Structure formats: structure tokens, C-alpha cells
Image (spheres, helix red, strand yellow):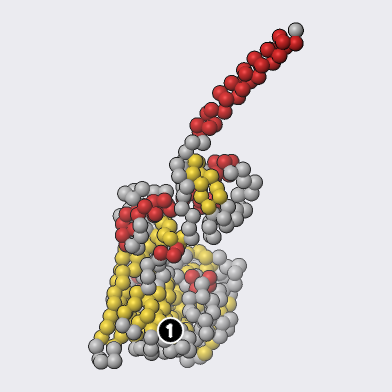
Amino acid sequence: MPEMALLALLVALGLWFGLYAGLSAPRAHAQENVGSYTVVAGDTLFEIAQRFGVSLDALVALNNIQDPSLIRVGQVLLIPGASHNLAAIPTTLVQTLPGDTLALVAQRYNQDINLLTSLNNVSATTRLFPGQTVRLPADQAPPPLRFGAVREILWPAQLVQGRTGRLTIITERPLDLTADWNGLPLTFLPADESGVRYFTFLPVPALLGPGLFPLTVTYTAGNGEQLSRQQLIPVADGGYDSQIIELPPDRASLLDPTLVTSETAKVVAVWSQVSPTLWWREQFWRPIADQYRTTSPFGTRRSYNGGPFNSYHAGQDFGAPAGVTVTAPAAGIVALAEPLLVRGNAILLDHGHGVFTGYWHLSELRVAPGQQVAAGDLLGLVGNTGLSTGAHLHWEMRISGVAVDPMQFLDEPLAPPE
């Protein structure tokens, strides 16, 4: 009898192991194509899932992650659907241009295509959409441009329509530098007291590109010879919306091109000046209280009274009742303060080195030309004067005459520190 019981137990165990193996086989098969990836600084689980084309839920489940917001540098993650271990190196992001493939990006940045396909989980010939981010090895970024007495020329890896970059040049000795940014002449200021570090701003017109555009840096050598180098800088699409504006009959006459041209010539003569001093170094302050929201952002493509979308909004509009105070966002000198036909009661502040801010449609002006102001000083009051359909503040920024997004200056310290 004990022999029979032992035999029955062995048979049962055999059946159980066979059933377990049968149930486990699909899971083992499902995990055959699993690679691994080691987390590096700057990674998030969501971005890793996007990069390798897997769902966040699948990544969380496979790695038994309790809190998707908590991953650590050096942590090894299993990646479903990958057949090999994936590159784990510090990376930087660049944006693609129209018509780009990963092979073209690799060629433009002098990168190994096999490494880029591993970093981005994209084939070399896949067509990428404009503005799509691509990962490059951080320690294999393009070397700084240098020539003659110029040791380094540093610029943003990617510029965006309507935004501003900073160009920094380091030299072996003091130089008289100039630059040409796609036809726009630029001058330099000292970045510090070393005498060999210089900077200037790179304003990108809102309607420029996307595409590659030339930046040329020039200086005169000791023998009188002019030396220069050119670099193509990628500009990405700004993703701006469009807007149709209907003006009431009593304001429609302000669209007369003659009136617009005459007034534009007046303000252009002011904001085209480039003073040799930079009056500010810190981030800008908001020129109106936080409670007043944006009603029309910078860069919006505009049509007036059913016309073509052949213009864009050159500033940031804040909806606010008439009489709300408007203050200076940074130190500067009042370059213009007077009533204009289209811009209404208007103020232009010169912040130095070609940086101007404008304040249109005010009900009252509280400053005078030549007056020095500091951040937070009263400039005027919100109104509805000029080409306006309701009380609001139009805040505009010009750099070397180019209209750029002023909101960027609230978030980024674009001027080098003193």
C-alpha cells in the first residue's frame, strides 16, 4: 500500500510540473525580446518609455516599479521589445529640421549613426517631423568653432522662431569683433572684466525658417587682414497659432498702410539704436500684476477684418481694466513717451545693447523721454488707445530691431552675470 501511495504522489507531481511548464512557456516566450537600459542623469520614466516606443504601464509592470516618478541614476531597467542592451550615456537634445532623417542629423552633427539609432530607437531612414527632439551624446557634441585669435564661439544648439539666444566668444587677446546673423549686423559687449570674453544676443524673427541660417563672426588681425568664419545655425518652428481680429468701423481706418508705414518709421528709428551699455543683468519682471492673464501671446499669425494672415502679433497682450498700473520690467532709459495713432499712448524703454521694450495703448503716460527707470518703477496706466478693441496692455520687445518673445526674459537670465 505505501508503494501505491508513493507512485500516486509521483504521478501527481509529474502532472503538476508539466502543467506549470505549460503555463510558464508563454511568459518565457513573451520575455525573449527584452533589453536593458541604465538610467542616466536627466532621465524620466515617461521619457524613457517614449524613446523606446513602449507604454509607460508596460515599463512599470515589467520592472515592478511602485512610484514611476522615482527612478535613480544607475538603475537598470528592462525594456520590452528590445533584443539587446541599450546605450546608457549622458545625452543632450537637439530639434530636427524639415525633411530630416536620423542619418541627416548624424551627418550634420558629425555623429555615429549606429549610436544615434540606439539612443533614439529610430531607424536611420525614418522621416522625422520638424521640431522633433533627437538625442546626441553629451560628450560628443560638436566642437566649438575657433579660428585665429578666437578660441571658442559658443551658441545655442537650437534656436526657435521668435525667441532669443546668446552668442559668447572667448578670445586669446582683446579683439574688435562683429557678427552677421542672417543679414542682421551684431556688435559685442564684454561678458566680464577679463577682456577676452564677449557676448551678444541672437534674436530670431518670428517668420524666419524653419531651416539653417548663417552666422558669420569677423575680426581684424594685427596685420590689418579681416578674418571670419561662418556657421549654419538651425532654427526650429515656434508652433504659433493664428487669430482673426474684427475691428469696429471707427477703428478700421487705422489699417491704412500709409498711417502704419509712417508710424513704423518713427518707432524703428528709436529701437534701431544700439547703446554701448547694458542697463540690466537679471531676469525681467512682469510689467503688470500676475492676476492679469495673457489674452493674445507673441507670434500669433493675424488676419484683420478677413484679410490674409500676412502679419503676426509682435508682442504679448494682457487683458486688464483701464487704469491698471504698468511698471518697468528692468532698468533702462525712456526713449519715447508720446501719443501715436496706431499704438496709442506709447512708451519705449532702452535697456541697452539694442534691447528695447514697448508699452502700447496706455490711457496715461507717467514718464518722460530721457528719464532713467529701475525695475518696478511706474510707467503708465492700461488703456484702449490706438488700434485696440478693448482695454489691455501690449508688451513688446525688440532686439536690434527684431521683435522677439518678451516672456522668455521672465524665465531666462539671457544676459551674463556681472
Residue at 34%, 84% in the rendered image: 149
Say what secondary structure mark 1 lies in. Answer: strand
Residue at 40%, 73% in the rendered image: 155
**Residue 383 drawn above or below residue 95:** below
**Residue 121 drawn above or below residue 21:** below
- Quarter of the image where one finds residue 136: bottom left
**Residue 336 drawn above or below residue 291:** below
Residue 199 shown left or right of residue 6 in the figure: left
Decide if residue 243 is in sight here. Answer: no
* Residue nearest the viewer, comparing 115 with 410: 115
Residue tagged by mark 1? 197
Residue at 37%, 73% in the rendered image: 144
Counting from the top left corner in percent of width and height, residue 281 is at 52, 82
Q: Give the quarter of the figure containing the N terminus.
A: top right
* Residue nearest the viewer, comparing 156 with 165: 156
Q: Judge the density around disc 1: few (<14), some (14-19), many (≥20) Cα neighbours within 10 Å.
A: many
Callout 1, which amino acid? Arg
**Residue 36 drawn above or below residue 167:** above
Counting from the top left corner in percent of width and height, residue 306 is at 35, 59
Counting from the top left corner in percent of width and height, residue 126 is at 34, 48
Counting from the top left corner in percent of width and height, residue 249 is at 40, 66
* Residue nearest the viewer, comparing 77 with 155: 77
* Residue nearest the viewer, comparing 42 with 362: 42
- Quarter of the image where one finds residue 93: bottom left
Decide if residue 397 is in sight here. Answer: yes
